Image (spheres, rainbow, N blue to C red):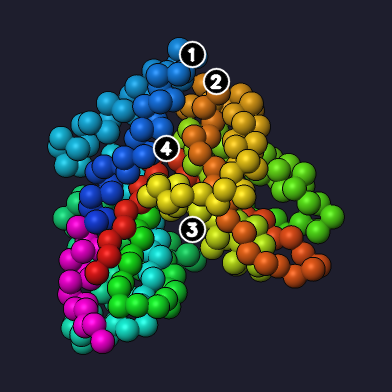
Amino acid sequence: MKEISLLEVTDKVADLLVSINQRLPARVERLLSRARNQETVVLARHYLEVILKNLKVSRRLHLPLCQDTGMVTVLAECGQEIRFRADPAGSLTGAINEGVAIATRQGYLRSSVVEPLSHINTGNNTPAVVHFSLVPGDRLKLTVMAKGFGSENASSLAMLTPASGWPGIEDFVLETVRKTGPNACPPLFLGIGIGGTSEQACFLAKVALTEIAIGRQPDHGLRKLEQQLKERINQSGIGAGGFGGPHTALDVRIKTYPTHIAGLPVAVAVSCWAHRVGQIEL
């Protein structure tokens, strides 16, 4: 039985959250650079150049790369052979939230999390949204995503009928991007969740978003559909910054789960160009 200190979890989460708000994943930055090099629309190319310059400045000055430092989502994969040491945080959820609070202070992250009805600010970006899964082994893997609400507000869920099939899914994704994409700071990254129940589809879409950033290999059985969807999205004419051109979406990832014979849940999770994701393993 492996023992993990909750204090160590707090420290690791704090360091990671500060880091991802100052430096994008290498794969995300490569896709932005490639889009800049291929862009032919003058204003869109300038917009991409400003983004890439901003990334260099944030790294040099150790400051957040976007004013909206987001709400934190954590995917926690907990090995069945782990025992957590009873530190002051009291629980794994408490340790994660303490890490978010520390990162907010140390990383100059804007406090954006409020109570939903009163809109009273919690003051430290907690609580995070934490999803747990129990897996074999003695490792704890935490995937942390800081997601601004310009893109979160663009996300969508549809409960389609089975008869809708792939054409209905494609139409729903395209309509979501047409309606909300220009306000979500494109170029975009899209996670698509298909199947399960309504909440499972939304969860799959978020997982798909994280996999884009950390470079996990796609399901080759779905890659053709992902490429087809990206091509159609990029024909929308929205483009980088909403200035037109072929770079509305830089990558699309689909994840599926078996569903009921009577339904076809589909969720679209949208991320802006500032796709901030990191991962730690203890």
Q: Are marks 2 and 1 in contact (CB under 8 Å)?
A: yes
Please say if 93 is above or below 59: below
Which amino acid is tagged 2?
A: Gly
Which quarter of the rendered picture does the C terminus lie within? bottom left
Q: Quadrant of residue 280?
A: bottom left
Magenta-span inclusion, residue 180: no
Which amino acid is tagged 3?
A: Val
User: Mark 3 and mark 2: span between their CA atoms?
Assistant: 28 Å
Is disc 4 surrounded by few (<14), some (14 to 19) or many (20+) residues within 10 Å?
Answer: many
User: Mark 4 and mark 1: span between their CA atoms?
Assistant: 18 Å
- Closest to the observer, 232 or 123: 232
The residue tagged 3 is 207
Q: Earlier in the sequence, mark 1 or mark 3?
A: 1
Please say if 73 is above or below 43: below
Choose mark 4 or mark 1, whichever is in front.
1
Q: Earlier in the sequence, mark 2 or mark 1?
A: 1
Which amino acid is tagged 1?
A: Thr
The residue shown at (84%, 55%) is 163
Which amino acid is tagged 4?
A: Trp
Looking at the rendered structure, which numbered label has been put on residue 40? 1
Tell me where the magenta segment starts and ends, as one range: 1-15
Q: Earlier in the sequence, mark 2 or mark 4?
A: 2
Please say if 189 is above or below 263: above
- Closest to the observer, 47 or 183: 47
Q: Earlier in the sequence, mark 4 or mark 1?
A: 1
Looking at the rendered structure, which numbered label has been put on residue 245? 2
Q: Are marks 2 and 4 in contact (CB under 8 Å)?
A: no
Q: Earlier in the sequence, mark 3 or mark 2?
A: 3
- Element under disc 3: helix
